[in-house]
Amino acid sequence: MFRHLDHTALVGALAVAAGLVACDQAPTAPGATDVASSATSSQASDAAPLAAQGVTYAAMGGGQQWSTPPGEEMRPALRRFTFTAQKKADGTVSGHYNIVGASGLHIEGAVTCLSVVDGRAWIGGTFRNAQPAPMFTPVGVVFEVLDGGSGPDAIDQISNLGIFAAELGATEENVQQFCDDAVPGPVSPIDLGSVMVK
C-alpha cells in the first residue's frame, strides 16, 4: 500500500519548485541556493499575516539536503524541496509541495492534509506530476518536517518522502490517515534552507 522512497530518489524535484506557492504556475528551475534562500526569506514575510487570514496551523519551508544512496558512499546526492501547507479553523487545508531528487525524479502536487504537534508537521497531498513517470500509480504523497527553532544552533529536519501506490491497495484516505495519526517517524537535518511550523 505504501512505497517509501529515499530522499535521493525524490530530492531532485524541488529545484523546479519556484512555482510552489503559486499552484497554477508552471514550475521553473531556479538554482539550489535560489530555492533555499527564496523559501527562507518568504517565510518571515508570510508568517505574520497567517492569523489574519484565519490560518490556525501552517508549515512552510525550502532547502536542500545531501544524502548518500545505498552503495554510492563515494557519490553523495543532493535533493531539493519546497512546500507550503496551511490549515484554517474550519478544517480546510491548502498548499503545495515540490521535490526534486538527485536521481532526476521531480514530484509535485497539492497539499490536502496537515497536522501539527510541538513544532513537527505531518503533511500529505495529491500526486499531480512526476518526471519521469513512475512505474506504479501513485495516489498520494506524505512527509514530515521538524522546526528546530531559531538561532545559530537551530537544526530543521525533514523525512523521506512516502508515496501511496494504487497497486498496493492504497487510496487517498491513507494520506489523510497519515496526518490524523501524527506518529513521529525518522527525520534528518537539512543542509541549507529552513522549515517553519506554526
Image (tube, rainbow, N blue to C red):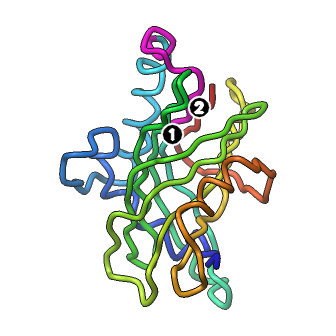
Rendered-image quadrant of the C terminus: top right
Sequence order check: which comes first, mark 1 or mark 2? 1
Left-right relation of 187 to 38? right
Q: Pointer 1 and pointer 2: residues touching (CB < 8 Å)? A: yes
Is 111 placed above or below 78 here?
A: above
Tell me the residue that label 1 is attached to.
61
Residue at 27% from the left image edge and 52% from the top image edge: 30
SS state under label 1: strand
Residue 23: name its quadrant: top left
Residue 142 point in image, percent of width and height: 59, 59
Q: Nearer the viewer, residue 54 or 60?
A: 54
Left-right relation of 180 to 87? right
Residue at 64% from the left image edge and 79% from the top image edge: 1
Residues in magenta, as a range: 49-60
Kind of residue indicated by mark 1: Gly
Kind of residue indicated by mark 2: Met
Residue at 38% from the left image edge and 60% from the top image edge: 108
Q: Nearer the viewer, residue 105 or 65?
A: 105
In the rendered structure, find residue 89 and report the number of the disc placed on it. none
Residue 134 point in image, percent of width and height: 41, 84
In the rendered structure, find residue 196 and report the number of the disc placed on it. 2
Residue 54 included in the magenta stretch of the image: yes
Q: Nearer the viewer, residue 16 or 172?
A: 172
Alpha carbon distance from label 1 to label 2: 6 Å
Q: Residues within 10 Å of mark 1 (few under 14, many from 20)?
A: many
